[in-house]
Amino acid sequence: MLTMQELSQGRTLAEEQGMTEEIGSAVARLAAEEMTAGRLDTARSLLEGLAVTNPRDPAAWAMLAQVERRQGRSWTAYLCAETAARLAPEDEQVRLVRAEVLLAIPEQGPAARAELSGLAGLKGPIGERARGLLAALGPP
């Protein structure tokens, strides 16, 4: 059993249970497949489990933000995206997910546009997606 003292020292439930990075990655891949198939409730359950067992994993929080956004829970998505961004502020995928979440909250539009502008110069799919979203938004 994980004690409050262990939690305060940064120990996670994943560590307590002996959950390896490989297991966490496998669960994340399964959740991604569920998202792709449109089974968002199943993906959400898997990702909530990942976030609870290892709250320091930005990928779990970012993926959970995507699920929450797709299910119309903008503020829950926002909290998950902000958590991911605090854990990995330089991670380009996390930044893109955060920007997409911010787009769903009207008062966060300028912040979303700023984040997308920062990503638009990147090569590869993240930069392409950022440029596409900026083009769709049109001029400020």
Image: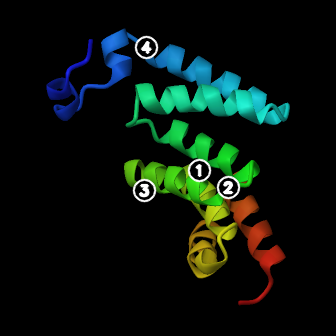
C-alpha separation, residue under disc 4 versus residue under disc 2: 28 Å
Residues packed near mark 3 inside 10 Å, few (<14), some (14 to 19) or many (20 plus) = some
For numbered disc 2, what is the local secondary structure?
helix
Residues packed near mark 1 inside 10 Å, few (<14), some (14 to 19) or many (20 plus) = many
Above or below, 122 relative to 68? below
Farthest residue in the bottom direction?
140
For disc 3, the marked residue is 89
**Which sits earlier in the primary sequence, circle 3 or circle 4?**
4
For disc 2, the marked residue is 126
What numbered label is drawn on residue 93?
1
Residue at x 18%, y 34% (from the top left corner): 8
For numbered disc 3, what is the local secondary structure?
loop
Question: In which quadrant of the rendered view does residue 21 lie?
Answer: top left
C-alpha separation, residue under disc 2 versus residue under disc 1: 7 Å
For disc 4, the marked residue is 20
C-alpha separation, residue under disc 1 versus residue under disc 4: 23 Å
Residue 101, given in percent of the width and then of the height, sits at 64, 60
Q: Are marks 4 and 2 in contact (CB under 8 Å)?
A: no
